[in-house]
Image (cartoon, helix red, strand yellow):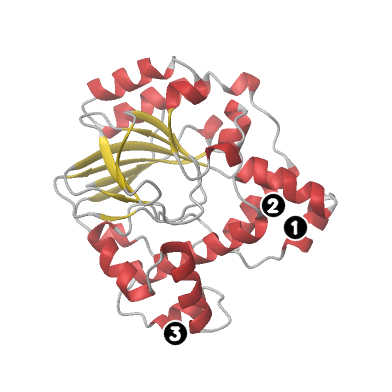
Amino acid sequence: MITWLEPSPALREFVRWYVYIHRTATAQHPVLPVLETRLAFYPRSACRVFDHRLQGIDTVARAAVIGPQTRRWVDLRPGPVEGFFALFQAGGFHRLFGADSFALADYAHPAADVIGPGIASVLERIEAAARPKEMACALDGYLATRLSGAGELHAVDRAAQALAVAHGAIDAWTLAARAGLGDRHFRRRFVEHAGMGPKHYAKVARFTFAVSLKTARPSRTWADVSQRAGYFDQMHLVKDFKSLTEAPPSRLISQIGPTGGDFFRPGPHDAEYVNPGLSDQGTAAVSVSY
């Protein structure tokens, strides 16, 4: 089961979606590179991962801030999965909490260490919730308390959002010019707000779109995926898959398995493909009023 819920209107410039995932059993599968910072809650049991950097098993805090993932570093361990997540807009977490996204990248940090001990009460409310909508209300209310001190939307946030919408198909020079910043200043601020440089951000955005295309329609050929995702040719797609995940495209898709669509909810700019979960009886998209 996977349920997508929209945040309240006041938070939509900061949060893309709330996502509830509940699967009774999963095989070990890779955690893919992603652009978003996520605030994660595991209400029933801890999440365990195999960290390839440590060559060992690690346990994620029950309330965690998961930074942008620049490549595949960990795999989820086999077993049941239940989690509730806030997926932030580009720069959204930085604006609400002031955290340097680069310092958060590629790791799951105990949320209390990043945003303070108040998050413990949110975890308690999520643990007590009977439905995903109640979980969303609990988290939405907490995030709303941060709005009065939130930072303004910066030019690099707009640039990161534009790059994500374009699936990486804008060069850094163009983005810097639009932001009205010099190249070095733009890149430094981009890393601070987005967790990685604009060139790598574009690479992950294009990769994510390619995976979305294939998981939405498995019969689509890799040649077609590479063309639609904006790769020069299929070999460039293969090269990016290997560098980001250490697996060629077909092997990665088989490793992901049926959970491949968990973090590929299309927004209004993604008319190119459909949400793969919409064909799954256990998937729902919900617009919630608070």
Position of residue 46 measured from the top left corner of the image (x, y, whole percent)? 25, 33
Q: Amino acid at mark 3?
A: Ala
> Which residue does the numbered mark 3 point to in the structure image?
223
| Left or right: residue 260 compared with residue 168 | left
Question: Mark number for residue 51?
Answer: none
Q: Local crowd at mark 1 within 10 Å, few (<14), some, or many (≥20)?
A: many
Corner quadrant of residue 257: bottom left
Q: Local crowd at mark 3 within 10 Å, few (<14), some, or many (≥20)?
A: some
Q: Amino acid at mark 2?
A: Ala
| Sooner in the amino-acid sequence: mark 2 or mark 1 | 2
Q: Are marks 2 and 1 in contact (CB under 8 Å)?
A: yes
Question: Mark number for residue 175?
Answer: 1
Corner quadrant of residue 39: top left
Q: Residue at x 40, y 31 (%)?
A: 64
| Left or right: residue 116 compared with residue 127 | right
Nearer to me, 236 or 218: 236
Q: Residue at x 33, y 22 (%)?
A: 123
Q: Residue at x 21, y 31 (%)?
A: 45
Position of residue 179 measured from the top left corner of the image (x, y, whole percent)? 79, 50
Q: Local crowd at mark 2 within 10 Å, few (<14), some, or many (≥20)?
A: many
Q: Residue at x 33, y 49 (%)?
A: 55
> Which residue does the numbered mark 2 point to in the structure image?
159
Distance from the alpha carbon under mark 2 to that under mark 3: 29 Å
| Sooner in the amino-acid sequence: mark 2 or mark 3 | 2
